[in-house]
Amino acid sequence: MLAVARSVPAPDGASIEWREADATVIDLPDSSFDLVICQQGLQFFPDREATASKVLRVLAPRGRFVAAMWQGIDHQPFWKEFTEVEAANLAPLGLTREDVTLPFSWGDPDALRRLLADVGFDPIELSTTTVEANFAAESFVEDLEYPYGALVPGFLEDPDAFAAYVNAVREESRDVLNRYRRDDRIVFETPANLARARRP
């Protein structure tokens, strides 16, 4: 991702420094940023409160924090069906349904508001939005499952097992994918919660 980002010309006059770092550490100076954006990340952090506190620390007074997180799996018709197929095929490797639905694990806007208020953000505005996902149908399953091939120990040790998993998901999700197919694309909506908060 960083290589792609660096390859894109910066807007006129902009100076951008791209870094790879642990977002739960944020080893940056106090009060040094006007804006921090977290796009579909906060739900993955083991200590969300500590991370939000660090974000507050690096923001200048009146600096803004903007975070987006998918709403819960029960609000995601496509993903609710598709992740059931994934979970059934990943269970033999020790992964649970909770592991597979982790991207949708923190969709409660009230919990997000409490977290930001508890660490000191004020004011806090919450809203919802819906993103239309639009993927190439032909490579959808392969593209989507690629991270599992790189992260699941059983697949790292046995690439043939990963290929068999991808084939199983493709076959078992065929009916789901056909319902969301528009010509050569897979199209569906994914609702998300958006938070806009300021450091006092």
Image (cartoon, rainbow, N blue to C red):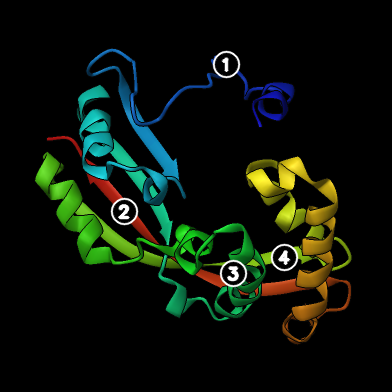
Indicate the secondary structure of the residue bearing disc 1.
loop
Q: What is the number of the mark on residue 13? A: 1
Q: Are marks 3 and 2 in contact (CB under 8 Å)?
A: no
* Among numbered discs 4 and 3, the one appearing first in the sequence: 3
Q: Are marks 2 and 1 in contact (CB under 8 Å)?
A: no
Identify the residue under disc 3.
87
- Specify the amino acid type for callout 1: Gly
- Specify the amino acid type for callout 4: Asn
At 36% from the left edge and 33% from the top edge, which residue is drawn?
Answer: 36
* Among numbered discs 1 and 4, the one appearing first in the sequence: 1
Q: Position of residue 62 (x, y in %)?
A: 19, 32
At 17% from the left edge and 35% from the top edge, which residue is drawn?
Answer: 199
Indicate the secondary structure of the residue bearing disc 4.
strand
**Measured along the vertical axis of the image, is residue 4 above or below residue 98?**
above
> Which of pointers 2 and 1 indicates the residue nearer the eye?
2
At 89% from the left edge and 66% from the top edge, which residue is drawn?
Answer: 138
- Specify the amino acid type for callout 3: Ala
- CA distance for labels 3 and 2: 30 Å
Q: Quadrant of the C terminus?
A: top left
- CA distance for labels 2 and 1: 29 Å
Indicate the secondary structure of the residue bearing disc 2.
strand
User: Is residue 178 left or right of 56 when viewed as pictured?
Assistant: right
* Among numbered discs 1 and 3, the one appearing first in the sequence: 1
* Among numbered discs 2 and 4, the one appearing first in the sequence: 4
Q: What is the number of the mark on residue 134? A: 4
Q: What is the number of the mark on residue 195? A: 2
> Which of pointers 4 and 3 indicates the residue nearer the eye?
3
